[in-house]
Image: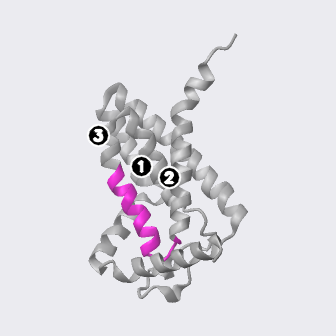
Amino acid sequence: MRVSEGLRRADRFVAQQAGSRIPARAGRVLSAVEEAAESSKLWCAAAAAMAVSGGWRGRKAAATGLAALAVAQLVSNGLGKRLTDRPRPPKEWFPHDETDDRPDSSSFPSGHTAAAVAFTAAVAPAWPAAGAACAVPAAMVAVERVQSGAHYPSDVAAGAAVGLLTARLARHAPHLLWRRGP
């Protein structure tokens, strides 16, 4: 069996399990968190709270988180989705009507997950407690994207990878820009 065939089978299995095994009440909670994260509202609100209440550390965490989020959105939605054009999982896999409310854009990678992970991973080194608090809704967003039928698990994994890479870039870019060479 080729790796790509194994990945397709795993994607299908996990997506169908998430769509049918997560209880309806939990699904509603996941959807509410995802809706709060839509258009990065949740992460912008978190950044504002950090900037207001966290002093220098909070402002640094907020700025780094928002920078990472912006780059992650650009990479995942502006570049990744345009290059891949992967269809969303089939609606028939999901025994609920949440698939009726999903976008028509490419499934790969998950922009919601990329943004959530980028913000959280960029905030955590500057303010670990805030990063830990952001990790809970970030994980919920990632799970919701599969449970709702909007993404395959591999789309979410790729979005998380984009988020981690852009967070690293956002944390290290100022040092690279200001480094003086001989």
- Measured Cα–Cα span from mark 3 to mark 1: 15 Å
Task: Tell whether label 2 touches label 3 (CB within 8 Å).
Answer: no
x and y percent of residue 6 in the render? 58, 75
Image quadrant holding the N terminus, namely bottom right
Q: From the viewer's perspective, is the residue at label 1 or at label 2 nearer?
A: 2
Task: Tell whether label 2 touches label 1 (CB within 8 Å).
Answer: yes
Query: Which mark is drawn over residue 129?
Result: 3
Say which residue label 2 marks.
115
x and y percent of residue 90 in the render? 56, 84
Going by the numbered disc 3, the residue's amino acid type is Ala
- Left or right: 88, with 22 as reference point: right
Say which residue label 1 marks.
43
- Measured Cα–Cα span from mark 3 to mark 2: 19 Å
Of the numbered discs 3 and 1, the one sitting upstream in the chain is 1
Of the numbered discs 1 and 2, the one sitting upstream in the chain is 1
Q: Which is more toward the observer, 46 or 26?
A: 26
Asked if residue 148 is among those painted magenta in the image, a careful observer would answer yes
Residue 136, by quadrant, is bottom left
- Measured Cα–Cα span from mark 1 to mark 2: 8 Å
Residue 57, by quadrant, is top left
x and y percent of residue 111 in the render? 55, 59
Q: Measuring 44% from the left and 44% from the top, which residue is drawn there?
A: 121
Of the numbered discs 3 and 2, the one sitting upstream in the chain is 2
In this picture, which residue range is highlighted in magenta? Answer: 135-152
- Left or right: 79, with 139 as reference point: right
Q: From the viewer's perspective, is the residue at label 3 or at label 2 nearer?
A: 3
Q: Measuring 58% from the left and 31% from the top, which residue is drawn there?
A: 173
